[in-house]
Image: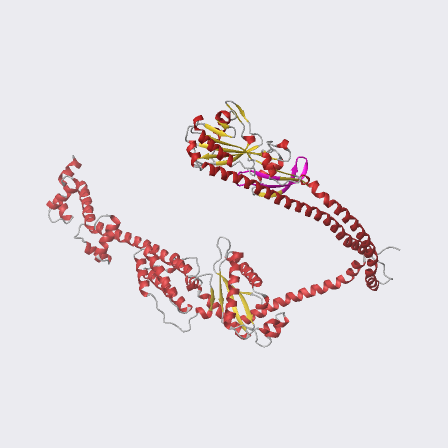
C-alpha cells in the first residue's frame, strides 16, 4: 500500500520535531558542562592570581616601607654625608645593625646594600667596601640616574659589566631607592635584594591546574614553577604578546601556549609594572566534561529511539481526520491529483477565497472614497444633516457616534522650498501631508483627512473629555503632525483649529473658522498652531493706522533714501503686526499702505503697472502673503525699491530736459536781455529750482554759461564779420565796450582787437 504524501511528510516532520531537541539537548549538555568547568577553573585561577598578587605586593610594600624608614634615620642621613673608614667602626656597626633589622625571615631579604654616592662607600652584609663583590659600586651607581625615586627590578636585568668584572644578581628581585628620594642627583642609594624563590613561595600553584608565574616589565620571568625558565625572555611568545596588548588591568582569554590551547589569566600590577600570569591547558580542564558528554550521548540515543516510535504511531492517528476531509472533498470517482492532501484541498477552495478577497478589497476601497466624499460635503456645508451618522457607520466609522466634541484642523504648507519644490509640486506635497496626518492621528480620533484647495483638513473628535482636556489633546496632535511634516518633508506648516462642534451641521462652520485662524499667520508668523478663539478678538477694536509712519515712508521714497525707506517700512510692519485686531482689518491696513504707495507713483506720473509688468495683480499677491517677513519683503522688493528706482530715472530725465531747454533759450536769445527769471517764466519753473538743476547737470551756473556762450559768439563774429568791437559789445548786451574788453581779456588773455589781429596776421 502506497503511503500518502501528507502522511509521509507528517512522519518526517514529527521525527524532526522530536529528534532535533534531543540532539540539541545532548550537544548543549556537553557544551555547557565543558564551558561551566572551564569557567569555574578560570574564576578559580583569577582568584588565585589575585591572592598571589596581593601577598607578593604586600611583601614588596613592607620592604619598600622599611627602606624608606631606614633612609629617614638620622644616623643614616648623617653617615651618607660622612667619609667612613676603619676609624668609624661605631657608625659602621650602627649602620650594619639597622641594615640587619630589616632582613627579617618573613620578608625573605637576601642582602641589603647602602651606598653613599657622595662619599663613595658601600655597606652590605659582607661589610664595608673592600669586602663587597667587585663591580657592585659601579652597578649601583648606574641606578642613580633612574627617573623614579623608588623602583623594583629583577636581577636578570640588573647584571652589568663593571671595571672589576661582571656583577651577577641572577634570579633576584631588587628594590632600589634614592636619597633624597626625588633628587635628580641623589647623595645615597639603598638596594634590597630578595630571592626569586622567596617570591615563588608566596604564589599559590597547583601543578595539575597549570602554571602561575610573574614577568617583569621587559617580559622576563621573575618566578616560575620551572626553575629553568627563570630569567628567560618570554616577550616573543604569542600569548605573552596578547597579554601585553590588553588595555585592561586584568582579564581572561583563550589562546595558544606553546603548541596547545590554554586558558590564560593575567593581572597587571600598577605598583611595579609586573604581570602575573596563569596558564591552564584546556585539555586538563575538559577531561571532567568528557564523561558527562558520553552519558549525555547515551541518554540522547535512548530518547531518540522512543521519539521515532512515538512519531510513527502518533502521525497515523493525526492523519485520520485529514484523510476523512480529503475523501469527502474528492470523491473516489474523480482522479486523485499528484499532490498532498492539503494542497488538493487548498486548490479546491482557493478560487472562492480569491473572489471573496477581491470583493472585500473593492468594497473597502469604495467605502474609503465614499467616506472622504461625505466628509468633504460636510465641511463645505453641502451634506444633509439627516442620516450622516448612519452613513458613517456603514463606511466603517461607527465610533464617531460616541463623539461629544469635535474640532476641524486645517494644515497648510507655509512656503515650499524653492530649491527643492515648485508650485507644480504643491498637490503632491499636500497628498504627502495627508498621509502623514493619516499615520500620526489615531484612527479612532479622526475621520479620513482630505485635501481642499491648499489645505489638508482633519476632523477630530473625542468622547468623555472636558473642553479644556480636548483642546490640549488637539494641540498635542496638531504639534505632532507639524513636527512630522518638518521631519519627513523638511517643510514648515501652520495649523488652524476651529472652535468645538457638538453636531454634524456645525462642521462647516468649523472649516470656515479654521481658514480664518490660518489668516492670522500674516500677523503672527509662520509654523504656528492657531486656535480661532485665541487669535480672533472677542470684540472689534478701533483701528489705529500709523499715518505718521506712512508719511515718513512716502517722504523717504520721494527723497530717494533707500535705507531710510527700508527702516520706516520695517517700523510700520511691526506697528501693524503689534495691534490686536481682526485679520480683515489688518489686511485693510496693508491695502491702505499699498494704495498710498500707488498714489505716490501716480502723482509723479508713473503707472503702478511699471512695477510688475508681467506679474500677478498686486492686490492678489499681497492678500496671498502669510507671514510678516514675507509681507515686508514683498513691499520692499515689489514697491519701495522699484518706486525709488523709477523716481530716480524720472528725475534724471526731467533734469536733463530742463537743462536742454535752458540751453536752447540761451542759443535763441543770447543777444537780448536774457535773465534766469525770464527763463523760469518761459519754462514754468521756479528760478531757484532751474538754477539748481542747471548747475547739477552742467556743472556751472546759468550766468557763467550765458557769458561763455556770448564769448563764443563774439570770437566767431571777430573772425567772420567786420563788426567793430563796440558793435559786438552792444549786440551782446554789455553796458559798455570796456566791460566786454575786460571780460574778453580775463577769459582769453588778450583783448578783442589783438585776437582779431592775430587771426588776420
Residue 327 forms part of the magenta stretch: no
Query: Percent from the top left, x then y, of residue 675?
Result: 18, 53
Residue 227 visible within the image: yes
Left or right: 172, with 91 as reference point: right
Q: Is residue 653 above or below residue 98?
A: below
Q: Nearer the viewer, residue 87 or 626?
A: 87
Left or right: 326, with 538 as reference point: right
Q: Nearer the viewer, residue 625 or 91?
A: 91
Query: Percent from the top left, x then y, of residue 40?
Result: 66, 47
Q: Residue furthest front?
A: 90
Left or right: 637, with 722 as reference point: right
Residue at 59% from the left image edge and 72% from the top image edge:
400
Q: Is residue 509 above or below residue 163?
A: below
Query: Percent from the top left, x then y, of residue 87?
Result: 43, 26
- Which quadrant of the figure contains the N terminus? bottom right
Q: Residue furthest top?
A: 164
Residue 273 forms part of the magenta stretch: yes
Kindly indicate the quadrant of the structure image that contains residue 759: top left
Q: Nearer the viewer, residue 434 or 55?
A: 55
Residue extent of the magenta highlight: 253-277
Q: Nearer the viewer, residue 59 or 585?
A: 59
Q: Residue furthest right?
A: 1
Q: Is residue 401 above or below residue 411?
A: below
Query: Percent from the top left, x then y, of residue 752?
Result: 14, 41
- Which quadrant of the figure contains the C terminus? top left
Kindly indicate the quadrant of the structure image that contains residue 683: bottom left
Residue 500 visible within the image: no
Amino acid at each position: 500500500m502506497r503511503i500518502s504524501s501528507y502522511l509521509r511528510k507528517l512522519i518526517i516532520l514529527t521525527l524532526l520535531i522530536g529528534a532535533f531537541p534531543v540532539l540539541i539537548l545532548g550537544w548543549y549538555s556537553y557544551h555547557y558542562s565543558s564551558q561551566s568547568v572551564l569557567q569555574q577553573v578560570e574564576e578559580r585561577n583569577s582568584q588565585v592570581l589575585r591572592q598571589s598578587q596581593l601577598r607578593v605586593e604586600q611583601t614588596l610594600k613592607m620592604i619598600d616601607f622599611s627602606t624608606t624608614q631606614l633612609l629617614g634615620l638620622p644616623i643614616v642621613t648623617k653617615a651618607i654625608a660622612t667619609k667612613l673608614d676603619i676609624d668609624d667602626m661605631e657608625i659602621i656597626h650602627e649602620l650594619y645593625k639597622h641594615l640587619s633589622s630589616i632582613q627579617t625571615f618573613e620578608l625573605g631579604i637576601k642582602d641589603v646594600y647602602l651606598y653613599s654616592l657622595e662619599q663613595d662607600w658601600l655597606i652590605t652584609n659582607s661589610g664595608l667596601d673592600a669586602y663587597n663583590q667587585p663591580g657592585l659600586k659601579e652597578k649601583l651607581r648606574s641606578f642613580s640616574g633612574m627617573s623614579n625615586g623608588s623602583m623594583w627590578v629583577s636581577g636578570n636585568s640588573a647584571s652589568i659589566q663593571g671595571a672589576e668584572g661582571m656583577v651577577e644578581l641572577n634570579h633576584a628581585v631588587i628594590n632600589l631607592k634614592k636619597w633624597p628620594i626625588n633628587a635628580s642627583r641623589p647623595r645615597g642609594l639603598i638596594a634590597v635584594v630578595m630571592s626569586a624563590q622567596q617570591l615563588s613561595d608566596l604564589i599559590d600553584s597547583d601543578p595539575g591546574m597549570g602554571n602561575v608565574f610573574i614577568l617583569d616589565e621587559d617580559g622576563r620571568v621573575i618566578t616560575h614553577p620551572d626553575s629553568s625558565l627563570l630569567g628567560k625572555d618570554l616577550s616573543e611568545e604569542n600569548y605573552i604578546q596578547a597579554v601585553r596588548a590588553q588595555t585592561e588591568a586584568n582579564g581572561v582569554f583563550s589562546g595558544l601556549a606553546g603548541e596547545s590551547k590554554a586558558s590564560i589569566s593575567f593581572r597587571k600590577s600598577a605598583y611595579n609594572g609586573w604581570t602575573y600570569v596563569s596558564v591552564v591547558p584546556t585539555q586538563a580542564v575538559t577531561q571532567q566534561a568528557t564523561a558527562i558528554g558520553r552519558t549525555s550521548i547515551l541518554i540522547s540515543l535512548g530518547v531518540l529511539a522512543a521519539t521515532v516510535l512515538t512519531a510513527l504511531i502518533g502521525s497515523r492517528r493525526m492523519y485520520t481526520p485529514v484523510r476523512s476531509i480529503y475523501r469527502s472533498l474528492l470523491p473516489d470517482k474523480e482522479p486523485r491529483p499528484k499532490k498532498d492532501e492539503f494542497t488538493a484541498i487548498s486548490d479546491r477552495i482557493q478560487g472562492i477565497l480569491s473572489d471573496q478577497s477581491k470583493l472585500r478589497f473593492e468594497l473597502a476601497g469604495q467605502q474609503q472614497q465614499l467616506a472622504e466624499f461625505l466628509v468633504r460635503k460636510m465641511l463645505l456645508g453641502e451634506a444633509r444633516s439627516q442620516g450622516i451618522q448612519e452613513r458613517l457607520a456603514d463606511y466603517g466609522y461607527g465610533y464617531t457616534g460616541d463623539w461629544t466634541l469635535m474640532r476641524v484642523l486645517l494644515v497648510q504648507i507655509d512656503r515650499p522650498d524653492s530649491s527643492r519644490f515648485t508650485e507644480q509640486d504643491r498637490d503632491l506635497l499636500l497628498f504627502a501631508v495627508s498621509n502623514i496626518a493619516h499615520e500620526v492621528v489615531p484612527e479612532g480620533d479622526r475621520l479620513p483627512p482630505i485635501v481642499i484647495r491648499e489645505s489638508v483638513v482633519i476632523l477630530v473628535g473625542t468622547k468623555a473629555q472636558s473642553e479644556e482636556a480636548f483642546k490640549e489633546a488637539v494641540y498635542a496632535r496638531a504639534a505632532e503632525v507639524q513636527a512630522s511634516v518638518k521631519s519627513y518633508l523638511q517643510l514648515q506648516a501652520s495649523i488652524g483649529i476651529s472652535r468645538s462642534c457638538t453636531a454634524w451641521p456645525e462642521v462647516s462652520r468649523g472649516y470656515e473658522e479654521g481658514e480664518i485662524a490660518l489668516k492670522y499667520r500674516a500677523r503672527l508668523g509662520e509654523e504656528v498652531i492657531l486656535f480661532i478663539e485665541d487669535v480672533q478678538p472677542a470684540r472689534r477694536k478701533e483701528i489705529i493706522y500709523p499715518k505718521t509712519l506712512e508719511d515718513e515712508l512716502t517722504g523717504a521714497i520721494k527723497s530717494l533714501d533707500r535705507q531710510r525707506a527700508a527702516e520706516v517700512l520695517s517700523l510700520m510692519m511691526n506697528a501693524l503686526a503689534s495691534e490686536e485686531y481682526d485679520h480683515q482689518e489688518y489686511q485693510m491696513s496693508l491695502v491702505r499702505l499699498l494704495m498710498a504707495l500707488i498714489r505716490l507713483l501716480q502723482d509723479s506720473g508713473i503707472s503702478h503697472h511699471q512695477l510688475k509688468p508681467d506679474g500677478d495683480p498686486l492686490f492678489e499677491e499681497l492678500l496671498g502673503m502669510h507671514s510678516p517677513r514675507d509681507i515686508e519683503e514683498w513691499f520692499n522688493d515689489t514697491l519701495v525699491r522699484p518706486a525709488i528706482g523709477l523716481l530716480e530715472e524720472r528725475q534724471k530725465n526731467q533734469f536733463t530736459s530742463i537743462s536742454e531747454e535752458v540751453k536752447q533759450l540761451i542759443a535763441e536769445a543770447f543777444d537780448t536781455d536774457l535773465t534766469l527769471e525770464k527763463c523760469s517764466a518761459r519754462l514754468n519753473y521756479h528760478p531757484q529750482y532751474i538754477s539748481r538743476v542747471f548747475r547739477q547737470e552742467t556743472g556751472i551756473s546759468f550766468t557763467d554759461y550765458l557769458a561763455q556762450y556770448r564769448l563764443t559768439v563774439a570770437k566767431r563774429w571777430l573772425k567772420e564779420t567786420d563788426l567793430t568791437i563796440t558793435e559786438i559789445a552792444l549786440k551782446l548786451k554789455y553796458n559798455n565796450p570796456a566791460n566786454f574788453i575786460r571780460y574778453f581779456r580775463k577769459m582769453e588773455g588778450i583783448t578783442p582787437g589783438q585776437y582779431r589781429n592775430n587771426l588776420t596776421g
